[in-house]
């Protein structure tokens, strides 16, 4: 089986042992070291490490002091953590349909979704390419809105040279399958000194110093053990990203012209870091998306469907009071993409033989 992803953190062994031998394994100097390295990658003054990517989104919303009825506009085509975080923060969710070329919020649809109660735009940088921040960031500025970037899949990505996570408040995931992983973990990035201070207090039970409580806080801390796993990866992020980019280029060249298959695009001005390589299996393909996924699995090619439904199209969100009036039919592009999207292996550990096998197998089963 050629897996959809491979986790290899052996480079972290020395740092992990160092933490274990220190006898201090909770949040400490290794977390600070990780934060400094991550801030350099994101091009921001501050990087605040937390215990997972969902926490990053929740905390970012909490420090904005949203009030009941305040709205967050986001994408309907995303991992459920995006929606869950907004609901946990007590905000009302509104959605804007996506574009097919970058899988992210369409700026025109986003502008139409903004109301007098909207306080935050939350674009999702999906699969490793940013949303169209050249239009979304000015829209937020024009309407007086905060920007929280769901950058869970986009560490190292950029729009016209500006890194993901530096357009407002950036929220990253460091889950096991991400381009940079700490097994579980997250990071919030910002240039705002006041927000950074609030986030650091909030993540530590509301304490500025031991038993000096300033707000009702939470335990959102990352441990030094987790930070030690991530530091060596940040040091070689450029190398890891270059390998993903080379693999994606080879896949696109090999799969171009396959009947019924659309390969992903790298849009002008964007640095794509290829967290996922996601094709669209159109209605005229020999097999449906699900049939292709099954055929590839049978032939030993790992793959993934990210995501099989629009994010709110589950019974647990039906008639939710904080998701007013949203229907699947209102988001035709997102629904179409959810029916057609299939991700193929693109991770840095693929060999040339693996890439050839993936290409030849996909083309064979689709009749190319």
Image: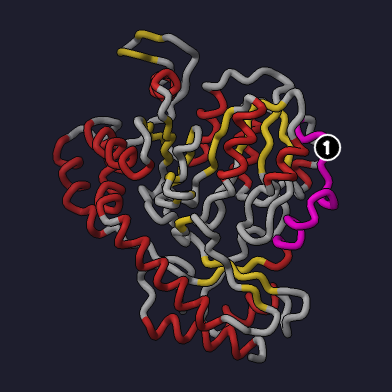
The image shows residue 142 at horizontal and vertical percentages of 64, 29
Across and down, in percent, residue 317 comes to: 76, 41
Disc 1 residue crowd, few under 14, some 14–19, many 20+, Cα 10 Å: few
Residue positioned 68% across, 36% down in the render: 73
| Residue drawn 46% across the image and 73% down it | 249
Residue toward you, 201 or 329: 329
Give 262 or 304, whichever is nearer the viewer: 262
- The residue indicated by pointer 1 is 319
* Place of residue 286 in the rendered image (x, y in percent of width and height, measured from the top left): 73, 85
The type of colouring in the image is secondary structure
Q: Which residues are magenta?
A: 322-338
| Number of numbered markers | 1
Q: Is residue 56 above or below residue 199?
A: below
Residue at coordinates 81% horizontally, 34% vertically from top-left? 324
Instruction: State the residue at coordinates (40%, 66%).
Output: 244
| Residue 189 part of the magenta segment | no
Instruction: Please indicate, yes or no, whether residue 207 appears anywhere in the rendered image.
Output: yes
Image quadrant assignment for residue 186: top left
Left/right of residue 64 with respect to residue 118 in the rendered view: left
Quadrant in which the C terminus is drawn:
bottom right
In this rendering, position of residue 283 left or right of residue 344 = right
Taking the image as shown, residue 12 lies to the left or right of residue 314, namely left
Q: Does residue 323 show up magenta in the picture? A: yes
Indicate the secondary structure of the residue bearing disc 1: loop
Image quadrant where residue 247 sits: bottom left
* Res 55 seen here: no
Image location (x, y in percent) of residue 288? 73, 77
């Amino acid at each position: 089986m050629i897996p959809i992803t491979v986790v290899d953190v052996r480079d972290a062994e020395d740092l992990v042992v160092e933490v274990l031998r220190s006898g201090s394994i909770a949040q400490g100097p290794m977390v600070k070291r990780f934060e400094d390295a991550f801030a350099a990658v994101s091009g921001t003054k501050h990087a605040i490490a937390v215990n997972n990517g969902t926490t990053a989104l929740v905390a970012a919303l909490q420090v904005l002091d949203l009030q009941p009825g305040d709205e967050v506009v986001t994408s309907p085509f995303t991992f459920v953590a995006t929606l869950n975080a907004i609901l946990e923060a007590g905000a009302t969710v509104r959605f804007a349909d996506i574009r097919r070329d970058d899988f992210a919020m369409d700026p025109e649809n986003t502008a139409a979704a903004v109301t007098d109660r909207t306080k935050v735009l939350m674009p999702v940088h999906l699969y490793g390419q940013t949303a169209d921040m050249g239009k979304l960031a000015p829209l937020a500025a024009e309407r007086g809105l905060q920007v929280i970037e769901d950058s869970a899949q986009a560490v190292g990505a950029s729009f016209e040279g500006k890194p993901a996570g530096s357009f407002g408040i950036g929220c990253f995931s460091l889950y096991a399958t991400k381009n940079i992983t700490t097994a579980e973990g997250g990071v919030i990035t910002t240039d705002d000194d006041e927000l950074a201070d609030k986030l650091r207090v909030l993540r530590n039970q509301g304490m500025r110093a031991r038993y000096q409580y300033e707000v009702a806080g939470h335990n959102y801390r990352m441990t030094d053990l987790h930070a030690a796993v991530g530091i060596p990866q940040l040091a070689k992020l450029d190398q890891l990203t270059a390998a993903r980019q080379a693999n994606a280029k080879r896949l696109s060249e090999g799969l171009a012209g396959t009947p019924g298959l659309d390969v992903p695009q790298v849009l002008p001005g964007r640095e794509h870091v290829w967290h996922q390589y996601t094709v669209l299996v159109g209605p005229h393909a020999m097999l449906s998306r699900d049939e292709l996924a099954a055929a590839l699995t049978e032939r030993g090619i790992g793959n993934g469907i990210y995501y099989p439904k629009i994010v709110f199209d589950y019974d647990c969100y039906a008639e939710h009071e904080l998701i007013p009036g949203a229907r699947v039919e209102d988001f035709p592009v997102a629904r179409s993409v959810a029916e057609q999207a299939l991700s193929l292996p693109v991770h840095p550990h693929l060999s040339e033989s693996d890439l050839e096998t993936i290409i030849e197998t996909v083309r064979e089963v689709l009749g190319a």
